[in-house]
Amino acid sequence: MNRILRALTCAALLSAPGLLPALAADTVPGAAVKHKVIFQVSDNDPAKWNLALNNVRNIQQDLGKDSVEIEVVTYGPGLNMLKLDSAVSARVGDALGQGVKIMACENTMTNTKVSKADMLPNIGYVKAGVVELMVKQQQGWSYIRP
């Protein structure tokens, strides 16, 4: 019975594309693991933004900048913190310089009549912030909302 169970398990593992490399990364000593984390910032509050950016910096310091992919998705009232006159514009620029993706929701921009010309340089854009969060979580990204 054990032999049959082992054979079925092996067959299942071999027929699942991508499963063996994923398992190997968790079990092989020295294998690089790329962490992925997505932040939601939907508050028009510099303190909330500073908290999120502190979290981002801490993650990069603790795990190593090259070991983690970080994205900050902004929508709703939080979009104001990505405008040119934002109180946190320098910190956002620093995060961008450290490889963090900062994404603005185009749906919010359309609804609030904000254009890309009003926004900080070098940020990215997504059609819908909430959809971006949903898709990334379905892809296994860790979700944080400070």
Image: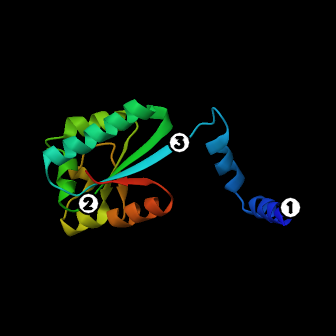
Q: Secondary structure at mark 1?
A: helix
Q: Residue at x 46, y 54 (%)?
A: 141
Rendered image quadrant of residue 89: top left
Q: Marks 1 and 3, how far apart in space? A: 35 Å
Q: Secondary structure at mark 3?
A: loop
From where the camera sits, is residue 83 visible? no
Callout 1 amino acid: Arg
The mark found on residue 64 in the picture is: none
The answer to whether the residue labelled 1 contacts the one labelled 2, judged by CB atoms less than 8 Å apart, is: no
Note whether 58 is above or below 48 in the view shown: above
Residue 67 in the image: state x and y as whole percent: 49, 36
Q: Mark 1 or mark 2: name the one nearer the start of the chain.
A: 1
Residue 129 in the image: state x and y as whole percent: 33, 62
Note whether 57 is above or below 45 in the view shown: above
Q: Nearer the viewer, residue 12 or 98?
A: 12
Q: Residue at x 21, y 69 (%)?
A: 111
Residue 50 in the image: state x and y as whole percent: 20, 41
Observer-side mark, 2 or 3, equals 3
Callout 3 amino acid: Lys
Note whether 13 is above or below 71 in the view shown: below
Q: Marks 1 and 2, how far apart in space? A: 54 Å
Q: Which residue is under mark 3?
A: 34
Q: Which residue is under mark 1?
A: 3
Q: Which residue is under mark 2?
A: 75
Q: Nearer the viewer, residue 82 or 4?
A: 4
- Would you say 6 lies left or right of 16 here? right
Observer-side mark, 1 or 3, equals 1
- Would you say 73 lies left or right of 89 here? right
